[in-house]
Amino acid sequence: MSDSFATRLNAAIRRTKSITCVGLDPRKAQLPGELQTLAQSEHPDAWAAAYTAFCKGVIDVVADLVPCVKPQVAFFEQLGPAGMIALGEVIAAARDAGLMVIVDAKRNDIGSTATAYADAYLGSVQGDAASPWGGDSLTVSPYLGRDSLEPFVKVCDERSAGIFVLVKTSNPGGGDFQDRLRDGRALYEDVADMVTSLNASRLDEQGYGPVGAVVGATYPEQLASLRKRMPHSILLVPGFGAQGGTAEDVRHAKDADGTGAVVNSSRGIIFAYQRDGYRERFGEQRWKDAIRAATVEMNVALA
Amino acid sequence: MSDSFATRLNAAIRRTKSITCVGLDPRKAQLPGELQTLAQSEHPDAWAAAYTAFCKGVIDVVADLVPCVKPQVAFFEQLGPAGMIALGEVIAAARDAGLMVIVDAKRNDIGSTATAYADAYLGSVQGDAASPWGGDSLTVSPYLGRDSLEPFVKVCDERSAGIFVLVKTSNPGGGDFQDRLRDGRALYEDVADMVTSLNASRLDEQGYGPVGAVVGATYPEQLASLRKRMPHSILLVPGFGAQGGTAEDVRHAKDADGTGAVVNSSRGIIFAYQRDGYRERFGEQRWKDAIRAATVEMNVALA
């Protein structure tokens, strides 16, 4: 039996001494000039090739610095099937480079349809499962309830894979429904309790299960309380950097061993060459050096 | 300016005198033998070709009987990029046959990422938008709140497209979070009120807006009350047939004009050749005749 997803991700955190997750969000308008040139045709195949080249460039630069990357599927999907082929190439390149892959697709549906999504995105450690994209883990939406989450957990069991359930998202409107109180308890707290319950019979030696949780850096108090409420979940913390979350805000995401959480930054790292300070220091041509410097900076800030 | 999505869908309901939506859920194990043979290789391209051939077969048979079809993206996605190419072929074939297309993908994310999903799946009436899949409408999950729905509505405005927000889903676990009460009001009612608010400034002559709602046939009382609570939304009603919903259960989905709702059946129609009665009457080779008979039967039941 392979090590579980949680065991592997926490080991990767220890090995790299980093909880940084690099978000792979290729956006046409922000790609460095050399890749814009590669994609000068508006044909989706040209843009897909540019996305693959860009993301592989990012992967090469960060592979020895961080435990994981998180491709945002929406941007690949925006290109159509050509983008979905590129997504597969990017996931394979990341795994070949020793990185764990969190596929950010926020999927869900009922029963056997949820299983189809799990099959699509969750690969086995050996790569022998019938998963065309073959990620290590997938983000999943909870609105459809427990019987929509269980099919994913079953596939996690079979493939030593993981999921991250949306609990408290980083966007300003995240509270519209998630903060809704019943008897003094917020919806996101009920979702958190379901996450904990799904992990119960599935803990590794360190006490972590396959069901992680997405908790935004932009709500630091809730992040601290959710860390305690979901002791068996690795937290995926978006909203750091460009969205406003700071190192102080995410201080409570880690467990006492410094593991159990990864903090994502997308634009702040992959388009660092456009940021103040970095732009002057590196310029567009040295976009890879800017990415490496931004990753090291984030590692230091979160250490 | 093109007619809005709601105007076009209600017109299609009037023209066909049907509120049946045929769910295109290709499942490997249930495809008729002739298509299993087509896909005899385990290669995804072979299965994708079988899915396309099967769904085109369904489309040919039902095009003059119903207003719309609903491809379930998860099953196409399960095949990987080859399946996503097939999905595009199926959507194009349905639109060419005069059917409205509801892309059932239950997508969502924050801000500009939500826009990427909208771009991916919502086409313009003229087909000139940069949408690789080009559906007429898309199912969307509400957990991330209002600012995650607004980017979809904006694209609907630009392309005369529509969305269906998950309000009350048909699965047994749908109530876990959706029925959660606050001050006597369920979460799904708050989601319904947000749907109504998003439609407010966008009504067509009949009083319908671009933001529809998914409400399961398996909860008939809530369906009746949600029909009243969302007077400006076309309802997409899953859970009929194989999931247990009956014609009596969905009686309250329609408005006084007999429009404003579509009731989906997937397995009950597309795999009718496997159902008791139909199996004996048609057999596997006449799977298309079975589909046509099941569609007519559903139209009659819902009339």
Image (spheres, coloured by chain):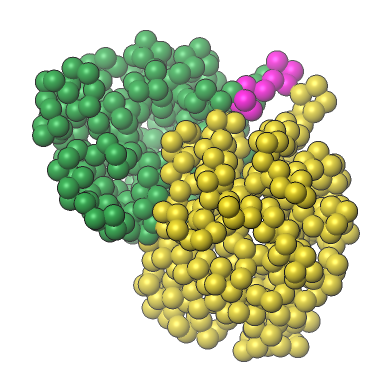
Chain colours: A yellow, B green
Along the horizontal axis of the image, is A262 left or right of B92?
right
Residue at point 45%, 18% (across, down)? B218
Residue B277, percent from left and from top? 18, 17
Residue B268 to residue A245: above or below: above
Which corner quadrant holds the C terminus of chain A?
bottom right
Residue at point 59%, 55% (across, down)? A2
Task: Evaluate whether residue B71 shows in this view.
Answer: yes
Residue A47, percent from left and from top? 44, 73
Residue at point 32%, 34% (across, down)? B23
Residue at point 39%, 17% (across, down)? B245
Residue furthest out toward the front: A1
Specify the quadrant of the image occupied by residue B27.
top left
Residue A71, percent from left and from top? 57, 62
Residue A284, percent from left and from top? 64, 86
Q: Nearer the viewer, residue A174 or B282?
A: B282
Residue A248 to residue A198: above or below: below
Provide the residue span drawn in magenta.
B176-184
Residue B150 inside the magenta-drawn segment: no
Q: Which of A88 and B98 is in front in this view?
A: A88
Along the horizontal axis of the image, is B165 left or right of A9?
left
Task: Evaluate whether residue A72 shows in this view.
Answer: no
Residue A264 to residue A280: above or below: above
